[in-house]
Amino acid sequence: MLLQEKYPEEIKGILARFPHKKSAVLPLMHLAQEAYGFTSREAMQEVAQILDLDPTHVLSLAGFYTLYYEEPVGKFVLEVCNDLACALRGADEFVQMASRKLDIPVDGTTNDGLFTLKTVMCLAACDRAPMLQCNLKFEEHLDEAKFDALISRLRAEAAAEKAEPSIVEQISAFAK
Ligand code: FES
């Protein structure tokens, strides 16, 4: 019951925003993701219990939306679009290059916990393909040099402890 112990006021506030408590499922899932670091089975069961929902329903939502992470993720989540427009502009090769340079497979996280690499469907920036989303921020017209620069910048930010909040923290703040 980590969620209810850690965020009793936030839960109350979220529930107060909706006429039917079941409608609060997505914001509560964001809160649970912040509390647990990802949408673990335990976290989703807790959300289901608060809302009197079937846990299977909450778990299916977590699997459907790409901003819910079913496994722990790194501080920076690099979500490379590999849908049609981006694929036509080299997204698959870009993903291979990123995977090689970070030394992780798609859906993997670097050993230092900094980067998770994912592929996602269209992010509605097709005219700026190939592109990726890093912690909700778009990086567009990508090539290898831009990727190298991005990774260097993020590593420097993390080293200087000036890095932006993690993706989990950003999503949670956005949902509040
Ligand atoms: S196909 Fe990549 S942003 Fe649309």
Image (cartoon, helix red, strand yellow):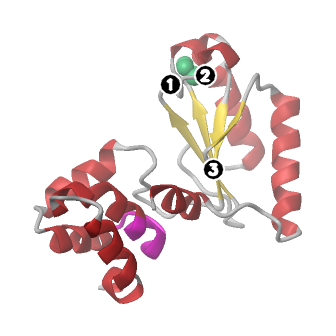
Give the image quadrant in which the ligand numbered 1 is located: top right
- Does the Cβ of the disc 2 residue fall within 8 Å of ligand 1? yes
Dot 1 or dot 3, earlier in sequence? 1
User: Magenta residues, as a range?
Assistant: 31-40
Measuring from the top left, give residue 24's x and y in whole percent. 26, 59
Q: Which residue is mark 2?
A: 125
Q: Which residue is mark 1?
A: 122
Measuring from the top left, give residue 127's x and y in whole percent. 65, 13
Main secondary structure of the magenta stretch: helix
Q: Is residue 171 left or right of residue 143?
A: left
| Label 1 packing within 10 angstroms: few (<14), some (14-19), many (20+) | some
Q: Is residue 109 magenta?
A: no
- Check contact, mark 2 vs mark 1: CB within 8 A: no
- Check contact, mark 1 vs mark 3: CB within 8 A: no
Q: Which residue is mark 3?
A: 135
Q: CA distance from mark 2 to mark 3?
A: 16 Å
Question: Which secondary structure lies at badge 2?
Answer: loop
Residue at 44% across / 65% down in the picture?
Answer: 38
User: Mark 2: which amino acid?
Assistant: Ala
Quadrant in the picture for residue 76: bottom right
